[in-house]
Amino acid sequence: MSASAKPSKSQKAPKPSPAATPPAVKPPGAYSLSRERYSSLGVDTEAALATLATLPVSIHCWQGDDVGGFEHGGQALGGGIAVTGNYPGKARTPEELRADLEKALSLIPGKHRVNLHASYGEFGAKPVDRDAVEPAHFKGWISWAKSHGLGLDFNPTFFSHPKASDGFTLAHRSKAVRKFWIEHGKRSREIGAAMGRALGSSTVTNFWVPDGFKDTPADRLSPRERLAESLDEIFQAPLKGAVDAVEPKLFGIGSESYVVGSAEFYLAYAVSRKKMLCLDSGHFHPTENVADKISSVLQFLPEVLLHVSRGVRWDSDHVVVYNDELQSLAREVVANGFLKRVRLGLDYFDASINRVAAWVIGTRALQRALLVALLEPTRALRETETDGDFTSRLALQEELKTLPFGAVWEEFCARQEVPAGLDWIGEVRAYEEAVLSKRA
């Protein structure tokens, strides 16, 4: 057939062999593209994901039952604690609370810790007062934590009790009342130490007391002297497995004008007594930058405990969300190499929304902030600052705000085998229908 001839209709052009067909090229996924984008700035996303997987958050049990606890039917809240909302389904027993925590933890990437208050022991039918609590009352919690590979942290409960009804505990004028609360503090340390030894992971026992005056006091000195003396007696005996922390507050409900345990009091106490300082992000003036305090206090303390909360106009303990304040906290911890010197925990209680969802939202928000901090080109930023090139520093800081960290976060969730995006909401709704809605 000549070159110009065409095949007849009865003839068919030969099909190309399979080998001649170019293979389909799978487009790179969102994570691959994000990884390349961060790599161009000198950031290794794989290293960031590996580090994030090692960072535990101490998740507070009291979000699950509105700070009620399990003391012989529960106590009415008091001592500067108030919870708003009446969303159905709160936990009523230790078993229900643990089940709710398990559901939340199944939707949160990584391995974490659970923070308990002394009022959450399993006391049985016989009433047990605060000055009689002991490790045996938390045997169920220790066993549960061990079975799930969780660490535990602990808090004495210096509120919601008849002997705290006038707003004073460790700084009380009455020696008998102080003795009661000092004994509670001692026993709480013993419980924390027992938890740490049993689980092979040191338990932080964090001391916060609500003591203070609603109106202007005539004597600011004496209560602080009594508080210091009470704390010294509580901490007198060294305990293996115990890590003690003290927590200041700007003001509370019923102590608007004066709090005995102020920021200055506890900072000085922690430095002089070699205790861990707890910085609660809701316990300072709304205009204070809590992130800025971290590098200051760690000049003089080996470790700090960071309680992450979200105050709205005041210390209202809203569910933590991913915002500028949270990001600044995470950045200070990561960029300064403080990950091994800062213990991360949550402290909020919101009864206006599903309580399991509140745990998931708050914990994942903190983890997101940590991931963004881990994805920061810290060296490049510091080089511009060292060179005095503040123009480039600002430009780079702005550029970082729109980098594709969301794809890296979804990759983290996938590797940790938890739902990404909003997929977890469906599981919470199913749990609510099957479990929470059945609670009276």
Image (spheres, rainbow, N blue to C red):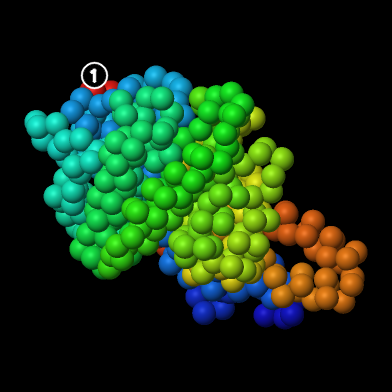
Q: Quadrant of the N terminus?
A: bottom right
Determine the residue located farthest toward the left in the rendered image.
125
Q: Above or below — where is 259 with respect to 266?
A: above
Query: Residue at the spot x=80%, y=76% of the render?
Result: 383
- Under tag 1, what secondary structure? loop
Can residue 43 be seen in this snapshot?
Answer: yes
Query: Residue at the spot x=29%, y=36% of the render?
Result: 176
Query: Residue at the spot x=59%, y=68% of the render?
Result: 300
Q: Which residue is mark 1?
A: 440
Judge from the rendering whether residue 288 lies leftward or rightward of residue 74; answer left or right: right
Q: How many marks?
A: 1
Q: Horizontal and vertical percent for residue 346? A: 46, 46
Where residue 199 sits, quadrant-wise, is bottom left
Mark 1 nearby-residue class (10 Å; few <14, some 14–19, many ≥20) = few
Q: Above or below — where is 72 with respect to 104?
A: above
Judge from the rendering whether residue 111 lies leftward or rightward of residue 254; answer left or right: left
Can residue 366 be seen in this snapshot?
Answer: no
Judge from the rendering whether residue 8 lies leftward or rightward of residue 235; answer left or right: right
Q: Horizontal and vertical percent for residue 52? A: 49, 64
Q: Horizontal and vertical percent for residue 186? A: 28, 51
The residue lying toward the viewer, choosing from 219 and 110, is 219
The residue lying toward the viewer, choosing from 135 and 61, is 135
Q: Above or below — where is 278 with respect to 98?
A: below
Q: What amino acid is labelled 1 in the image?
A: Ala
Query: Residue at the spot x=84%, y=60% of the render?
Result: 394
Q: Quadrant of the C terminus?
A: top left
Q: Above or below — where is 254 with respect to 431?
A: above
